[in-house]
Image (cartoon, helix red, strand yellow):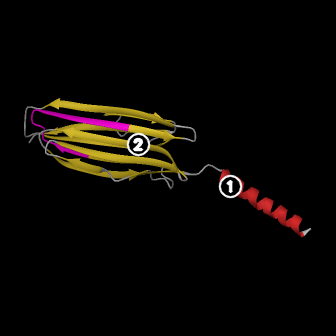
Amino acid sequence: MRSVAAALLLLAVTSGGAAASAAPPVARCAAARPVVSGTETAVEARVLTGCTAGELVVFRAAFTARAHGTSCTAVAAELEPDPADVPQWVRARLELVCAPGEKGLLGSRTTVEMYDQEDARVATYSFGDSFIEQNPAARHLWTVEFVGGLGELPVPVDPAVRSSSGSVGWGTSRAQADHSVYDG
């Protein structure tokens, strides 16, 4: 009798534990600090964003922004996570400052990868901005915002700003850029 009761208790504990572990793991999103490199004529910033469900990576995005000009001198980056207890998205804000002389160019490329148990899906998208400036002393500021995560992303601050977005499965990302010119 004792062994039957022990077996029933073991079965109840095991099945209760199995039911609890069968629940989908909570997803969490995070980003690495942006990596910035540059020369006298170009500056590049890279941001990696990822979301996990338990130990499994379910979404990953790599964003690269590159500004070209005759003198690119400053880059700043700021990260903002989803304020929820369990973050579902991460925002990176990049500021690229150049004094381009006659011509300048901003380009970006984003690769979004989504993983599930059967396969991996990939989407790549990009956008660019170019201009010709006659005043070599003019300063150009590109503000690039990149948001990546699962499900719904926060609403863009200014939907009229140049933007591009992509999604794969539940993973979604958006990059948008604003360009300002300051005289000398």
What whole-number distance in Å separates the C-alpha atoms at marks 1 and 2? 31 Å
Q: Which residue is mark 1?
A: 20
Q: Amino acid at mark 2?
A: Ala
**184 displayed left or right of 22:** left
Quadrant holding the N terminus = bottom right
Q: Which residue is mark 2?
A: 61
Secondary structure, mark 1, is: helix
| Position of 87 relative to 129 (above/below) | below
- Count how many numbered circles sit on residues in the image: 2
Q: Which residue corresponds to the image point at 42% horizontal and 38% vertical from the top-left?
A: 112
**32 displayed left or right of 45:** right
Q: Amino acid at mark 1?
A: Ala
- Could you classify mark 1 by the number of other residues whose Cα lies within 10 Å: few (under 14), some (14-19), or many (20 or more)? few
Task: Find residue 64 and report its horizontal and vertical position in percent.
Answer: 31, 41
Inspect the magenta stretch and tell me whether residue 100 lies in it. Answer: yes
Q: Nearer the viewer, residue 110 or 88?
A: 110
Task: Find residue 12 and report its horizontal and vertical position in percent.
Answer: 79, 59
Q: Which image quadrant is residue 21 in?
A: bottom right
Secondary structure, mark 2, is: strand
| Position of 7 relative to 131 (above/below) | below
Which residues are the magenta region? 95-110
Q: Which mark is residue 48?
A: none
**181 displayed left or right of 92:** left
